[in-house]
């Protein structure tokens, strides 16, 4: 019996072949990239990189600006059987140092302006190849590939072979590589196409970054499996989004995108008359944002829930009640349960740990079998780290987090990682990093610090400057507050809830 190629690209290819000269992307300058362009240029890159010696299963680490060529590179990695390892463009050397040491890529692709710094890191970690790709499409990668033949098939992959490796930090401050298989990505994208009614008639507004699950697998997966077109913006610029919305039928975004749209006087229902669906995820959507959006446009934002380890788990329905403050119902093929501390499922709206199981659930943490065993049970259920409830009609609500994490503008920040850097600064005895409600970012990162007595003490600006040199900007606290002593419980554990209560109003006037 012949098995179907499990390679995700093989499944995209059906639409690529069918859609041919149809624009897959329309850029801000109105130029377009067709589906045939995606197929041809990804073949060329796959040919070039394979001839260069990159092998099936090798990791390809990529830290480049969002551009059509960055998209070709993602597709080339899929079809050539490489493991795509995207990196947030904000990551600094210390963060990259860890990722390269852990992922051990065969190839690193970076922006030309970072080439020198990256060369040193690549040498340190024996990364065999370093190529550049700039935001304008130039660089040594496209230069090298220019004369490669645009001829390449699709490498056979099983469902369970690795397609991508994405890192998330953790409560210990050490990032974990999340192994996503071709089946994880395909099964989830297929069920989203169905659940959200995607078709070739759709035009998706794509303003998300393509180094995280949301913009990379959710948005692109829906477009490529349905043959939809995308309006492709390099980032979320309110003015450009307002210009593009009248051409679009679907938008995906984090809650900050929606609050920024609502903050514009120009945003109203006349711009959204062609839109059939607004989808929000990556961070909690406030009921107030949901209501204001409904008032302004007549449309209910559809909130869904996912994470890097599982892609999407639940969604409010396309047809039927979208309940503000809930993340909806389990997606087809995804089991969701709420369990108590003993691991027994609870019902009737009781709060417990949310666990999920299905083809969407990742293969485990890269080279961390113990951590994998901790979070991924023998029965296949993954413990998400979120606390929640399920009502009698099945709607899931997230009510808290078991893990210490802040979500700022749709990006996860692990306080431990920030605290470790702050605590290493001269003059600081200790610190506690917390999330405080913020009108724009949902939650903003805030550092509470305790100084050593009698030493030179770095002020807020000095602490922020030191952090900016070492960690990505989105993790850097928006505010640093010095206090005398951290509140602790009898076990000596810092009571972050008391700090959050104390500084709850910090951004209220903003
Ligand atoms: C940028 N900055 C931020 C953030 N982003 N600060 C806090 N939180 C952020 N999210 C900082 C920069 O370091 C910089 O600092 C300043 O803000 C301006 O930078 P800029 O790039 O101009 O920011 P922006 O354009 O205003 O970006 C904010 C944003 C962006 C539009 C909310 O962060 C964004 O697109 N977020 C979406 C992230 C996303 O795709 N999440 C999905 C993860 P300074 O000026 O001091 O240098 S996937 C996921 O979560 C799961 C799987 C799921 O369910 O989807």
Image: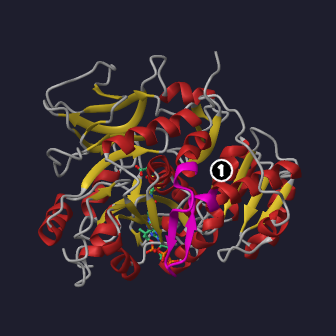
Q: Is residue 503 visible?
A: yes
Q: Is residue 484 left or right of residue 167?
A: left
Using the image as rendered, state which of residue 93 and residue 148 is in the foreground. 148
Q: Is residue 28 magenta?
A: yes
Residue 271, relative to residue 185: is it above or below?
A: below
- Image coords of residue 242 (percent x, y): 33, 78
Q: Residue at x 31, y 58 (%)?
A: 499
Using the image as rendered, state which of residue 363 and residue 40 is in the foreground. 40
On-image quarter of the C terminus: bottom left
- Image coords of residue 2 (percent x, y): 65, 20
Residue 10, relative to residue 297: is it above or below?
A: above
Residue 224, relative to residue 384: is it above or below?
A: below
Could you tell me how many numbered marks the image carries? 1
Residue 381, relative to residue 153: is it above or below?
A: above
Q: Secondary structure at mark 1?
A: strand
Q: Residue at x 24, y 71 (%)?
A: 272
Q: Quadrant of residue 271?
A: bottom left
Q: Residue at x 49, y 26 (%)?
A: 376
User: Which residues lie in the magenta part?
Assistant: 17-38
Q: Which residue is mark 1?
A: 85
- Image coords of residue 464 (percent x, y): 53, 74
Q: Is residue 218 magenta?
A: no
Using the image as rendered, state which of residue 30 and residue 209 is in the foreground. 30
Q: Is residue 161 left or right of residue 381?
A: right
């Amino acid at each position: 019996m012949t098995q179907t190629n499990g390679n995700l690209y093989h499944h995209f290819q059906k639409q690529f072949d069918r859609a041919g000269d149809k624009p897959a992307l329309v850029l801000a300058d109105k130029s377009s990239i067709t589906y045939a362009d995606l197929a041809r240029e990804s073949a060329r890159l796959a040919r070039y990189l394979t001839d260069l010696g990159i092998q099936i299963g090798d990791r390809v680490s990529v830290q480049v600006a969002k551009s059509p060529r960055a998209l070709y590179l993602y597709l080339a990695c899929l079809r050539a059987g490489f493991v795509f390892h995207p990196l947030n463009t904000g990551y600094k050397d210390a963060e990259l140092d860890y990722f390269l040491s852990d992922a051990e890529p065969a190839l690193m692709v970076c922006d030309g302006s970072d080439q020198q710094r990256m060369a040193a890191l690549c040498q340190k970690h024996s990364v065999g190849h370093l190529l550049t790709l700039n935001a304008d499409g130039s660089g040594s990668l496209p230069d090298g590939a220019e004369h490669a033949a645009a001829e390449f098939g699709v490498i056979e992959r099983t469902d369970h072979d690795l397609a991508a490796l994405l890192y998330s930090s953790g409560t210990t401050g050490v990032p974990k590589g999340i192994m996503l298989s071709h089946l994880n990505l395909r099964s989830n994208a297929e069920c989203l196409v169905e659940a959200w009614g995607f078709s070739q008639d759709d035009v998706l507004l794509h303003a998300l970054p393509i180094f995280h699950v949301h913009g990379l697998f959710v948005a692109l997966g829906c477009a490529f499996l349905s043959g939809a077109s995308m309006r492709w913006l390099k980032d979320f610029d309110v003015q450009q989004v307002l210009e593009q919305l009248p051409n679009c039928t679907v938008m995906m975004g984090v809650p900050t995108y929606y609050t920024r749209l609502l903050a514009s006087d120009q945003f109203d229902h006349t711009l959204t008359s062609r839109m059939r669906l607004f989808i929000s995820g990556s961070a909690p959507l406030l009921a107030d944002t949901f209501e204001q959006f409904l008032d302004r446009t007549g449309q209910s934002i559809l909130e869904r829930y996912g994470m890097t380890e599982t892609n999407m788990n639940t969604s409010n329905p396309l047809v039927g009640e979208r309940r503000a403050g809930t993340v909806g119902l389990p997606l087809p093929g995804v089991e969701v349960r709420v369990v108590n501390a003993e691991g027994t499922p609870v019902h009737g709206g009781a709060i417990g740990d949310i666990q999920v199981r299905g083809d969407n659930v990742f293969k485990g943490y890269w080279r961390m079998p113990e951590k994998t065993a901790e979070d991924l049970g023998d029965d296949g259920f993954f413990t998400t780290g979120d606390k929640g409830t399920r009502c009698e009609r099945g709607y899931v609500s997230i009510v808290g987090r078991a893990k210490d994490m802040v979500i700022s503008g749709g990006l996860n920040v692990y306080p431990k990682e920030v605290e470790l850097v702050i605590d290493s600064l001269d003059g600081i005895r200790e610190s506690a990093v917390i999330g405080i409600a913020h009108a724009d970012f949902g939650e903003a990162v805030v550092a509470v610090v305790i100084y050593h007595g009698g030493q030179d003490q770095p002020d807020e600006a000095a602490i922020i400057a030191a952090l900016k040199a070492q960690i990505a900007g989105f993790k850097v606290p928006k505010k640093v507050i010095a206090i005398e002593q951290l509140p602790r419980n009898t076990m000596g554990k810092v009571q972050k809830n008391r700090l959050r209560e104390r500084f709850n109003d910090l951004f209220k006037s903003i």
